[in-house]
Amino acid sequence: MTSCEIRESFAIDVGTIPNPNLFMTGLMINGFRYRSLIKTIEEEEPLFDGAILRKLDFSSTNAKFNPKISPEHPGENLIMRPLCPADYARGFVELLRQLTKVGDVSQEDFIARYKSMKACPDTYYLVVIVDVNVDRVVGAATMAIENKFIHRCATRGRIEDVVVCNEMRGKQLGKLLVETMLKLSEYIGCYKTTLDCKDAMIPFYQQLGLHPEPGNNFMVKRFHE
Ligand SMILES: CC(C)(COP(=O)(O)OP(=O)(O)OC[C@H]1O[C@@H](n2cnc3c(N)ncnc32)[C@H](O)[C@@H]1OP(=O)(O)O)[C@@H](O)C(=O)NCCC(=O)NCCS
């Protein structure tokens, strides 16, 4: 098997190609530009309206960011945005393997799950960070909204599946993902937002304003792994 080096990715303006429903993206591999990755607008359809991420107030944060980063400016060559179907090809599922067992998830499985989430508006907020240089998903987090009758028909948030790829750890992206999920849940109007984590992760989340609540426990009954 030959190895190859990916040097750059590029995007061509939709106006320059005949079919306006196509985005054409590509990669520079071993000095040759490949325009093989053609993505339709449907494949790039965000799970939710990404404009909400730009409305979040990052002027003050629980996390200490040095240098300052935000959903609009996550870092050089990085973008933060809602999950879209084309993120399967960008390695979203592979990234999740760095968090936990994922099992076999085909593109069809992924699209079916994406569509089921999309069919529940204002419920699933899956955010990804993409390195546009290599067109790969390098970070992700989920916030799921639960609508309740208690507390005057209140809404609560649950943060799940926070992960940053090995190569990009230590660049504040984990903090940015969690801070974004917290600000998003506050913006939506949640009365509280929770997450489950291993003991070793408590210090990471504490610096972001989350804390274990005395007297409250996390209970679970597992039906299979
Ligand atoms: C946890 C994780 C998301 C952190 O991502 P990251 O981008 O490396 O984190 P950041 O660069 O934003 O780190 C921020 C701070 O948290 C600290 N930190 C990072 N990982 C930590 C950990 N596992 N435990 C305690 N503190 C941690 C860092 O030291 C850093 O501290 P500083 O700001 O004082 O320098 C990443 O390590 C990861 O994906 N791990 C595997 C999946 C996982 O365990 N997810 C959490 C499930 S609950």
Image (cartoon, grey):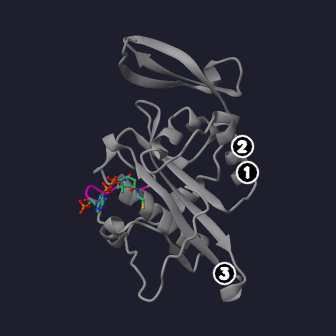
Q: Residue extending furthest left?
A: 66
Label 3 lies in ligand 1 vicinity (Cβ under 8 Å): no
Lower position in the chain sequence, tag 3 or tag 1: 1
| Residue that label 3 marks | 154
Judge whether 33 appears above or below 140 on screen.
above
Q: Residue extending furthest right?
A: 119
Q: Closer to us: mark 3 or mark 1?
A: 1
Q: Residue at x 38, y 75 (%)?
A: 209
| Residue that label 1 marks | 116
**In whole angstroms, how far apart are the C-alphas of marks 3 and 2?**
29 Å
**In whole angstroms, how far apart are the C-alphas of marks 3 and 1?**
23 Å
Q: Position of residue 15 (x, y in %)?
A: 64, 24
The N terminus appears in which quarter of the rendering?
top left
211 or 86, nearer to the observer: 211
**In whole angstroms, how far apart are the C-alphas of marks 1 and 2?**
6 Å
Answer with left or right where residue 52 lies relative to residue 98.
Answer: right
The reply to whether the magenta stretch includes residue 69 is yes
Lower position in the chain sequence, tag 3 or tag 2: 2
| Residue that label 2 marks | 112
Residue 175: name its quadrant.
bottom left
User: Which residues lie in the magenta part?
Assistant: 65-70
Q: Residue at x 49, y 48 (%)?
A: 101
